[in-house]
């Protein structure tokens, strides 16, 4: 019973609760329904009201258009208030009509009640009218932001809304202030200022920036002259009204002057705006505003990379157009540009990463880049170019350019090119007088005297810092900057003269002191030197030999001598004193600049001498000390050898090279020791098929086997062994014969240059089926000759050797400079195109090269589609370089690559870095100096009874020294050794040693020395008079076989005949 009562109670309570919840739900629904009904009624009421208002607005404009009602200012004010009350996106057409009605009211003559602005004078309506004007004008701004000026319909609306803004931000067009109303102008002007202040607070400048960017950030501007004038006038009015306050100047710089090339467009489309800029002296105000470091940094931080660059371009353009201001504010101008470039430089990256963006001027940039501005970057670049244009350079470097260079009596000229590959004897270096002028500039030696803390020096230093910063920031137009800075021929020589006058004792000592100081002053002085080096290096790189040596553009030869001496000492000190790296171990930019300029001069001198002997050597550097440090692994010695090996005498470098080779041989086990013998490779060669057999048996050998000992056994066509034991001699003969055959132009693997008969790969070598494998084999054989210290008479064209050494990969390599070593006549023809004053198009040239290839005319395009592209004055320099590159690189690219591949498998390319191109030629072919007979006599070995006091030997040396010419002595050396040049390190290093043997019989009867033959030779006993026989030789053993002649005259005549007929090259 108790449980039943409990259950009934629970049910009752549940029902009561549910009833309460139902009653509450009904009340909530009823309340919600009432609320919804209220919202709907309100919405419908609002819609009816808006519809009614819009109808009233439409009726008003329709009545005005049909002329049934006359407009007045009050009616426009009322209808505008209604329209603004309901204004939505769909009311744009009504708003357009309102703006037209307001503007039309302002144009009516002599009816003050119609003028919309007249309401400003009404006591009751002034404040509502002012609020309405602000709302209308801001609505105009909002609409302007979304319009595209390149669309015709939008362009009309842009004009309309700008007209509204122009009309109500200045009283100059208001008829109400004319005549008697002039007294009202101050009050109305304050109203305009109030309106502009309101617009500025809302973001007026941002709107103008968007409009300008949309219309100007493109190849062809879409803004008309009137539109651009209106926008610029609007942007300038608040600045003028605020009396050029910092706040407004900041907004103007951020939003207007950062628009891409806005100054360029203004100067072309609206010159009157440029007059306004000059009238208000805006450039000076900008310069002074940005000269405060915190203001400049604020501007840079607010602008992204591209916009900072745009601002920079506009300021530079203004400076170019306002030379007077630029001159007066040069210091501040330079500081501003340097600060802005330095800010951009923080974000310029050396490589691509996930955090960088590509910029067409800055390169990889780690800030956000506005790619929408890319279309306008060519115009911005053109503005930036004014910074290194002649006008601005003359203004900024006026202190340097005003210097007068001293003159002196005519001094000796540079050497002229000789018939040999490279050098003139130094005795001819100073023989000819200059023909160009009666007096030349004095050699500018460091004289000192100018205080480094003087205003003049500080100014020049800051300018150099600016341009150096530009070079490191504007990475993609670096070459343009350098070209601009080198355009004035007088700037660099006068810059050098300025450098020479710095400090109490001249430039070198001062700059060495700066290296050890980390002060701001030292950095600025070093920037001056860096800029000089970068520009000079660029100039000498682009000048051809005629301009450097004959016309002497910019620098006289004696100035180059002084500069090269300065640079050589400076770089040597940096390396030897260990101050070429920063704390992180990175090479200093200064070192790259100075070393680069030094090496360009050195390589130019190697190609065509302008310096005296030993000019590049350091007398205070002892080779023995250097070698000791190299043995100990000292870093400075390694760096010296890496960067400036030319300061070490050539003979010492060759010794070092031979030591390196010897050490490698030892490490590879190629040298015989007491405990082990090196592996020997044996090959059998048929004389009639020497090249084919050598190629077949050696080409597959690994590089280390070719570096090792190779024994050659010659057989005749019947397979019978020839007499002769190879103790390196037969291999030497084999190598010489192989090299003689492959470099013979008749084989068409190599050709000779016109004029000096030097060798380079033949472009038509492809007639040989396996020509690339042959080139690789030839490279290995030449490498083997150098590896073993054998000299071979193979004169290479210097451009080909440069490629073998990898010089053509250098940033400063110029194909046109090497072209004379291929074809001097072709070089003259190309450089005449460069100097052609008329229209190159008249010559009918195209970007192609026609060549007669085995009887057929073949057209090679220098670039894709080149045969249809005409050479013009604009692209003639490109044509010259493309042509030179094609002739020396493209045509023989595969052959050269194969040769280099083979050569470098034997000779480590790093070993050759210590030599210049002519020095490598000497490494291949021996010294080009005259034969030192005393050295030869000292290291000659005698056989067959001959000795140093034998009369025939005495006659021989006397004939060689007194009767033979230098050319005949060279022929004699070639007759015996197969090479006309002596070994680089002297005859002590000739292998096998130079030998002379007394012979009694002809070579085919010669069985070698016997006791009888030796005794007869020693005591001058002859079996019979040998007067009918000629001297012979065995070049494989460097052996001269000399009959025991009875008279000196017979010896002289027979020897002269033998060497001229070249009857040697026989095997004992």
Image (cartoon, rainbow, N blue to C red):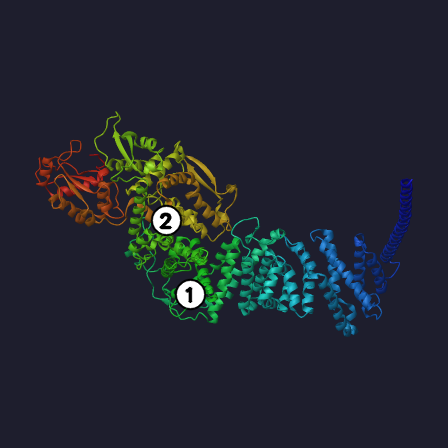
The label number, if any, that marks residue 913 in the structure image? 2
Q: Where residue 966 sits: x, y (%)?
A: 23, 48
The 10 Å Cα crowd at callout 2, few under 14, some 14 to 19, many 20 or more, is some
Q: Identify the secondary structure beneath mark 1.
A: helix
The label number, if any, that marks residue 784 in the structure image? none
Relative depth, front residue between 165 and 389: 165
Q: Nearer the viewer, mark 2 or mark 1?
A: 2
Quadrant where the N terminus is found in the figure: top right
Residue at image mark 1: 499
In the displayed structure image, the side of residue 286 where residue 80 appears, left or right: right
Counting residues from the start of the chain, the first of labels 2 and 1 encountered is 1
In the displayed structure image, the side of residue 144 where residue 1012 appears, left or right: left
Q: Is residue 414 above or below residue 699?
A: below
Relative depth, front residue between 211 and 888: 211
Counting labels gives 2
Q: Quadrant of residue 268?
A: bottom right
Q: Where residue 190 sits: x, y (%)?
A: 74, 70
The 10 Å Cα crowd at callout 1, few under 14, some 14 to 19, many 20 or more, is many
Q: Where residue 1018 sits: x, y (%)?
A: 10, 41
Q: Identify the secondary structure beneath mark 2.
A: helix
Which residue appears at 33% of the width and 52% of the height? 632
Q: Is residue 620 above or below residue 357?
A: below
Which residue appears at 22% of the width and 29% of the height? 722
Q: Quadrant of residue 716?
A: top left
Could one spot residue 308 in this view of the protein? yes
Q: Is residue 264 above or below residue 868?
A: below
Q: Where residue 639 sits: x, y (%)?
A: 38, 53
Toward the front, the furthest residue is 1
Relative depth, front residue between 1023 and 584: 584
Quadrant where the C terminus is found in the figure: top left
């Amino acid at each position: 019973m108790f449980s039943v009562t409990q259950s009934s109670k629970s049910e009752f309570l549940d029902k009561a609760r549910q009833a309460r919840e139902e009653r509450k739900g009904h009340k909530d629904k009823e309340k919600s329904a009432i609320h919804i009904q209220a919202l709907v009624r309100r919405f419908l009421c609002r819609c009816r009201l808006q519809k009614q208002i819009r109808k009233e607005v439409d009726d008003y404009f329709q009545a005005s258009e049909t002329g049934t009602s006359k407009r007045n200012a009050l009616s426009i004010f009322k209808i505008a208030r209604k329209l603004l009350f309901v204004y939505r996106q769909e009311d744009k057409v009504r708003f357009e009509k309102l703006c037209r009605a307001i503007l039309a009211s302002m144009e009516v003559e002599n009816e003050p009640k119609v003028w919309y602005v007249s309401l400003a004078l009404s006591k009751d309506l002034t404040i509502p009218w002012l609020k309405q004007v602000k709302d209308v004008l801001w609505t105009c701004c909002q609409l302007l932001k979304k319009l595209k000026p390149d669309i015709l319909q939008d362009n009309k609306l842009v004009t309309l809304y700008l007209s509204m803004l122009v009309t109500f931000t200045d009283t100059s067009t208001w008829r109400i202030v004319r005549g008697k109303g002039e007294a009202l102008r101050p009050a109305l002007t304050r109203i305009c200022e109030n309106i502009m202040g309101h617009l500025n607070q809302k973001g007026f400048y941002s709107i103008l920036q968007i409009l300008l960017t949309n219309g100007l950030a493109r190849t062809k501007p879409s803004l008309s002259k009137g539109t651009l004038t209106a926008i610029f006038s609007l942007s300038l009015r608040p600045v003028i009204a605020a009396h050029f306050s910092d706040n407004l100047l900041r907004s103007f710089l951020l939003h207007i002057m950062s628009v891409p090339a806005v100054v360029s467009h203004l100067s072309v489309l609206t010159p009157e705006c440029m007059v306004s800029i000059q009238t208000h002296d805006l450039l000076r105000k900008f310069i002074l505003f940005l000269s405060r470091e915190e203001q400049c940094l604020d501007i840079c931080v607010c602008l992204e990379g591209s916009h900072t660059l745009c601002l920079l371009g506009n300021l530079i353009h203004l400076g170019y157009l306002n030379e007077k201001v630029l001159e007066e504010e040069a210091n501040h101008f330079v500081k501003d540009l340097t600060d802005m470039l330095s800010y951009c430089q923080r974000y310029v990256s050396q490589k691509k990463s996930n955090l960088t963006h590509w910029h067409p001027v800055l390169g990889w940039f780690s800030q956000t880049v506005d790619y929408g501005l890319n279309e306008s970057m060519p115009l911005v670049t053109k503005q930036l170019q004014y910074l290194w244009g002649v006008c601005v350079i003359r203004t900024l470097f006026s202190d340097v350019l005003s210097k007068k260079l001293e003159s002196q009596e005519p001094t000796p000229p540079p050497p002229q090119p000789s018939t040999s590959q490279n050098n003139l004897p130094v005795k001819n270096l100073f023989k000819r007088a200059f023909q160009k002028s009666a007096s030349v500039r004095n050699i500018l030696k460091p004289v000192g005297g100018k205080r480094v803390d003087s205003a003049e020096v500080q100014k020049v230093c800051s300018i150099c810092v600016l341009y150096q910063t530009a070079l490191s920031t504007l990475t993609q137009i670096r070459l343009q900057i350098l070209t601009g800075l080198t355009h004035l021929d007088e700037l660099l020589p006068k810059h050098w003269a300025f450098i020479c006058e710095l400090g109490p004792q001249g430039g070198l000592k001062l700059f060495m002191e700066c290296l050890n100081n980390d002060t701001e002053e030292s950095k600025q002085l070093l920037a001056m030197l860096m800029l000089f080096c970068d520009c000079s290096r660029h100039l000498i790189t682009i000048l051809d030999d005629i301009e450097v040596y004959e016309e002497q553009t910019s620098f006289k030869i004696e100035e180059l001598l002084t500069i090269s001496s300065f640079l050589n000492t400076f770089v040597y000190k940096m390396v030897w004193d260990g101050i070429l790296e920063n704390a992180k171990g990175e090479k200093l930019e200064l070192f790259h600049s100075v070393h680069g300029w030094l090496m360009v001069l050195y390589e130019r001198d190697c190609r065509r001498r302008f310096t005296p002997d030993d000019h590049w050597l350091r007398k205070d550097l002892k080779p023995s000390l250097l070698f000791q440090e190299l043995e100990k692994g000292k870093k400075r010695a390694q760096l010296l050898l890496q960067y400036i090996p030319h300061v070490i005498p050539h003979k010492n470098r060759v010794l070092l090279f031979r030591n390196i080779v010897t050490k490698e041989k030892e490490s590879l086990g190629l040298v015989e020791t007491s405990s082990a013998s090196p592996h020997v490779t044996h090959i059998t060669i048929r004389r009639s098929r020497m090249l084919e057999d050598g190629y077949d048996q050696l080409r597959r050998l690994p590089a280390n086997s070719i570096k090792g000992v190779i024994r050659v056994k010659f057989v005749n066509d019947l397979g019978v062994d020839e007499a002769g034991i190879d103790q390196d001699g037969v291999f030497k003969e084999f190598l010489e014969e192989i090299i003689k055959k492959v470099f013979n132009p008749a084989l068409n693997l190599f050709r000779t240059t016109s004029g000096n008969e030097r060798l380079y790969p033949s472009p038509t070598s492809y007639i040989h089926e396996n020509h690339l494998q042959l080139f690789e084999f030839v490279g290995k054989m030449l490498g083997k000759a150098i590896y073993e210290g054998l000299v071979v008479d193979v004169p290479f064209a210097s451009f080909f050797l440069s490629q073998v050494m990898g010089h053509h990969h250098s940033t400063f390599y110029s194909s046109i400079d090497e072209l004379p070593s291929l074809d001097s006549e072709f070089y003259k023809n190309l450089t005449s195109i460069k100097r052609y004053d008329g229209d190159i198009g008249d010559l009918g040239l195209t970007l192609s090269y026609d060549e007669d290839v085995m009887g057929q005319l073949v057209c090679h395009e220098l670039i894709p589609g080149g045969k249809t592209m005409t050479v013009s004055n604009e692209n003639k320099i490109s044509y010259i370089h493309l042509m030179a590159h094609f002739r020396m690189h493209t045509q023989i690219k595969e052959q050269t690559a194969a040769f280099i591949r083979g050569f470098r498998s034997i000779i480590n390319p790093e070993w050759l870095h210590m030599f210049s191109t002519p020095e490598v030629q000497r490494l291949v072919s021996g010294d080009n100096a005259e034969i030192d007979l005393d050295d030869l006599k000292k290291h000659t070995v005698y056989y067959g009874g001959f000795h140093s006091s034998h009369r025939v030997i005495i006659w021989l040396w006397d004939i060689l020294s007194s009767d033979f010419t230098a050319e005949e002595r060279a022929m004699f050396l070639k007759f015996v050794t197969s090479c006309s040049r002596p070994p680089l390190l002297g005859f002590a290093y000739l292998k096998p040693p130079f030998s002379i043997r007394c012979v009694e019989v002809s070579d085919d009867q010669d069985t070698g020395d016997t006791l009888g033959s030796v005794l007869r030779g020693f005591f001058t006993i002859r079996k019979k008079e040998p007067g009918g026989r000629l001297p012979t030789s065995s070049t494989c053993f460097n052996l001269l076989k000399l009959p025991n002649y009875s008279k000196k005259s017979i010896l002289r005549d027979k020897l002269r005949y033998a060497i001229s007929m070249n009857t040697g090259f026989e095997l004992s």
